[in-house]
Amino acid sequence: MFGPGESSVVVECTGSGTCTVIHAIITSLLLFIMLLTGFAYTTLLERRFLASLQARVGPNRAGPFGLLQPVADGIKLIFKEDVTPASADKIIFWLSPVIKVVPAIIVVAVIPLGPKIAVPWFDGKWYRLSQGLVDVNVGVLWLLSITSIGIYGIVLAGWSSNNKYAMLGALRSSAQMISYELSMGLALVVPVMLAGSMSIGDIIDAQNDPPILGWYVFQNPLAAAIMAVALLAEVNRAPFDLPEAEQELTAGYHTEYSGMKFALFFMAEYIGMVAVSMIGAAMYFGGYHFVLVDQYPLLGPVVYVVKVIVLLMVMIWVRGTLPRIRYDRLMSLGWKVMLPLALVAVVWSSVSVIVAQELDNQGVYIALSILASVLFIIGALIFFDRIGRKPEVAPESPRVQVVNLSGGDGVGAMALHAVDKVVGLPGAVAGAVTGRGDDQEAKQDQAETDEI
């Protein structure tokens, strides 16, 4: 892994020494630069990927292959006019974008990006460092608490704008966050139970036994699916972007924002996409673990970035595929579907953990196999029941029949009939004389009947 000489000494970089301070400063700068770069090029990835899904080209003019398009967008937003409504609460109005963007950045502080590595220093010693800012033993609580703070930025932005559309968007967002954070919290309980720790590093390492197949997405796919949907709702991404629905709310909670303050909301959304992708990869997709990572720890961040990009593309794909759902159905999905299924997923993992303790770790696979078999049988029964049903035949359209309305003709109709008889009297006389009147009248009646 590293090649220090025999006289070199490896020191754990822990505590409050100089090593810890330097490591925290450098890692914070790297994370900040990584998130800002990720925000800029996630916008480009979304525009180009959606364009490919819709048989378009996407932005390709600014720089080679359009790679400078985020720079052009940033320069445009810097020079746009920054307007503050006269009736707005100006201090809260200015602080709201900051309150929204800061939690999106600091939420990744407890996520390690790779195994520990040893690096040399000027004093001749080698220091063992973690490839992350800090790995606290309550990292899952940190994720839950910090992701809950971002809602304050949205609610305060809507309230301080003194705009009814912005306020409605803020209320929608707060109700949506409360609804789906319950499911997200239960989905985060599953990795904690399976790993026996609330440390993100311990949860990632527990998914490496066995490699790849030990990922929690294979042990509890129901919880992984709930986690994915809840994280989409957490960052207000389609089809859960009701707080900024243009059809009903103009632009939602950021209707009155422009210039760099709008850019901060924009940045918070895309940094939030990167952050929740990192959380999902750590909780259910093995984090930085993959082939050769144990032998070459510097591959850990590369593997992590690849997984995050794949999850980002899935989020973009969902936006390009599914339409925005109705608000009442959004809330029904959160409370009537997601929450009960999350409870089922927690019970699923609880049974697996208990059986594993009783059967010396072999019970996990036994319990998962039994539960997976039961779910498969139930799904198969539902599927074949749907297939076996006879298709419903649409009823034939009723034949048109001419009916007589009760009540008889009115005075106007009687007068028209009388005029018709008078006008048709010469023809009737001529027909009677020639003997063809009855036949012609019968043919006319038959033609009208066939036409009907």
Image (cartoon, rainbow, N blue to C red):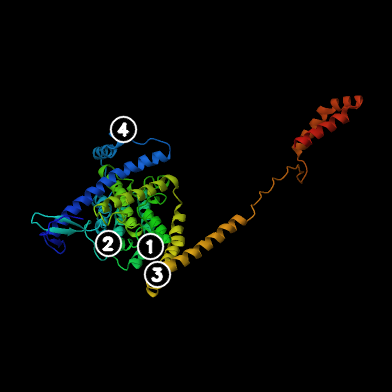
The disc, 4 or 3, on the residue closer to the chain's N-terminal end is: 4
Q: CA distance from mark 3 to mark 2?
A: 24 Å
Q: CA distance from mark 1 to mark 4?
A: 43 Å
- Please say if the residues under marks 1 and 3 sit with CB atoms less than 8 Å apart: no
Taking the image as shown, residue 41 lies to the left or right of residue 392, namely left
Q: CA distance from mark 1 to mark 2?
A: 18 Å
Callout 4: SS: loop
Q: CA distance from mark 1 to mark 3?
A: 23 Å
**Residue at the disc numbered 4:** 61
Amino acid type of disc 4?
A: Arg
Mark 1, mark 3: which one is toward the viewer?
Answer: 3
The disc, 4 or 2, on the residue closer to the chain's N-terminal end is: 4
Query: Percent position (x, y) of residue 104?
Result: 28, 53
Taking the image as shown, residue 405 lies to the left or right of residue 69, namely right
Query: Percent position (x, y) of residue 250?
Result: 38, 45
Amino acid type of disc 1?
A: Ala
Please rate how many residues cluster around mark 4, counting C-alpha atoms within 10 Å: few if below 14, some from 14 to 19, many from 20: few
Query: Percent position (x, y) of residue 204?
Result: 30, 60
In the image, residue 31 above or below residue 446: below
Indicate the quadrant where residue 108 lies.
bottom left
Task: Pick whichever, 203 or 110, lies toward us.
Answer: 203
Q: CA distance from mark 4 to mark 2?
A: 42 Å
Taking the image as shown, residue 185 lies to the left or right of residue 95, namely right
What numbered label is drawn on residue 362?
3
The disc, 1 or 4, on the residue closer to the chain's N-terminal end is: 4
Q: CA distance from mark 4 to mark 3?
A: 57 Å
Callout 3: SS: loop
**Residue at the disc numbered 2:** 201
The disc, 1 or 3, on the residue closer to the chain's N-terminal end is: 1
Indicate the quadrant where residue 41 lies.
top left
Name the outermost residue toward the front: 6
